[in-house]
Amino acid sequence: MIHLAAFLFTPSGMYDGWRHSAAQASADMDFDLIVDVTRAAERGKFDAIFFADTVAMVGNANPETMATGQSRQARLCYLEPASLITALAPMTSNIGLIATMTTTYNEPYHVARRMASIDHISKGRAGWNLVTSQIEEEAWNFGLEQHVAHADRYERAAEFSEVVKGLWDSWEEDAHVRDKATGQVFDPQKVHILGHKGPHFSVRGPLNVARPPQGHPIIAQAGSSEPGKELAARTADLVFTAQRTVEESRTFYQDLKGRMAMYGRDESSLHIMPGVVPIAAETDEEAQAILDEIESFMTVEQAIKAIQRHAGDLDLTKFDPEGPLPPLPPVNTARGRQQVLIDMAERDNLNLGQVARRFAASAGHRILVGSPKTIADSFEAWHMAGAADGFVLIFPFFPTPVYNFVDLVVPELQRRGLFRKEYESAILRENLGFERPANRFHRQSEPAPVAL
């Protein structure tokens, strides 16, 4: 079966999508609309929805953007994801709820406590999208003059994730006795101090939230650089990636799955889900008309400015748009995304203007336009080729493209036997087909009683 997750990147997953005539431009702050879209995704039996996050207003370093109020995208203000999925939990029943929280500008105890709480509130449907922060403006909100170095961010993230999982294991499932007659609250043999001391963190524990219903909430991760792939092989349950061809995706898939054995993990414990922007309609022609309207808003000059942050200190506006993409210096932001840009130009022999327009439209993700048959054919081909366990759907705007996918494409996938007709469970981990992780402390033969 194919797995599907909806990436609710409000107000638009394409930079100019929010300007489409059918788009709700205020979707970023419209909670009622987000509820409707989430319920539509649940009606479509999606595994999960998830929300991106940065802890800064992206683009506020650009004087032109600040002076004119114009940006290449409208996603500048939006609801904080952990708060949002907490609010969505009682309004849904089966769909997974995944929120992004950075390991660069957070502490492990905060994330472990927040995600464990949301897992309890949602009765086992919470997920944490682990990111290392790629936006340089974030540093300025946390007492730093410049962003933490790429290698240091990933080193910190690896330790961060291990601390979080250790804290989730603080309490065994039956640790709480709550015996009114004796006054005993918990079994001291079944609550554990983490006692972590490492290069980045010193965390005693235990967590002051009981073990999550899933054992560990699902961990999603999106890094495609070498450190990102190592982190994913070590820690992730879901990987959201960006490949535009089935050959590229299959190579990435085999590479990442092949790294898991060194961390004692089975390949089946990780789902790789490339991002795709689906534009679905009754016919291919109707779908193409939607894309044409969105693309009509973008000039080559705007597109080049949109990819500037992937070029570091190299000013792309000084190069001929009809000339080749110049050699790009390594950046301290999203190195995997920069490589997607470079690979796209080389593979398709695109000039600077062409690659800028193609990349900027969807941040390098594949745009899939057409009827239900066209889209289902592509999904089936990628899945059968061993290039994907499923797909992360990045909708061009909201809410119509979500409804179109649920009402048109999902039934076609179900008809082919490629997608579920009913949820297997009300637990996210079980819908994904993953086993519940063992408690690391429970595996010890003689656990020491906790001293609180």
Image (cartoon, rainbow, N blue to C red):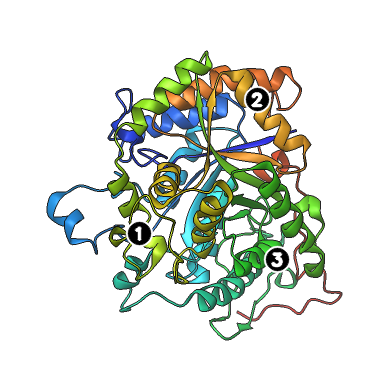
Is label 3 in contact with label 2 (beta carbons under 8 Å)? no
Categorize mark 2 by other alpha carbons within 10 Å: few (<14), some (14-19), many (20+): many
Position of residue 87 relative to residue 313, above or below, is above
Label 1 or label 3, whichever comes before in sequence order = 3
Residue 279 image position (x, y, % from top left): 49, 27
Report how far apart the C-alphas of labels 1 and 3 lie in the structure. 32 Å
Find disc 2 in the rendering and name its residue.
376
* Residue 82: numbered disc: none
Please state which of residues 331 and 404 is positioned toward the viewer in this rendering.
Answer: 331
Q: Amino acid at mark 1?
A: Gln
> Quarter of the image containing the C terminus?
bottom right
Hey, which quadrant is residue 97 in on the image?
top right
**Of the two numbered discs 3 and 2 in the rendering, the one whose residue sits closer to the viewer:** 2
Label 1 or label 2, whichever comes before in sequence order = 1
Categorize mark 3 by other alpha carbons within 10 Å: few (<14), some (14-19), many (20+): some
Secondary structure, mark 2, is: helix
> Quarter of the image containing the N terminus?
top right
* Residue 308: numbered disc: 1
Tell me if 428 is positioned left or right of 67 in this view: right
Secondary structure, mark 3, is: helix
Tell me if 94 is positioned left or right of 147 in this view: right
Q: Residue at x 44, y 43 (%)?
A: 358
Residue 156 image position (x, y, % from top left): 55, 76
Tell me if 243 is positioned left or right of 383 in this view: left
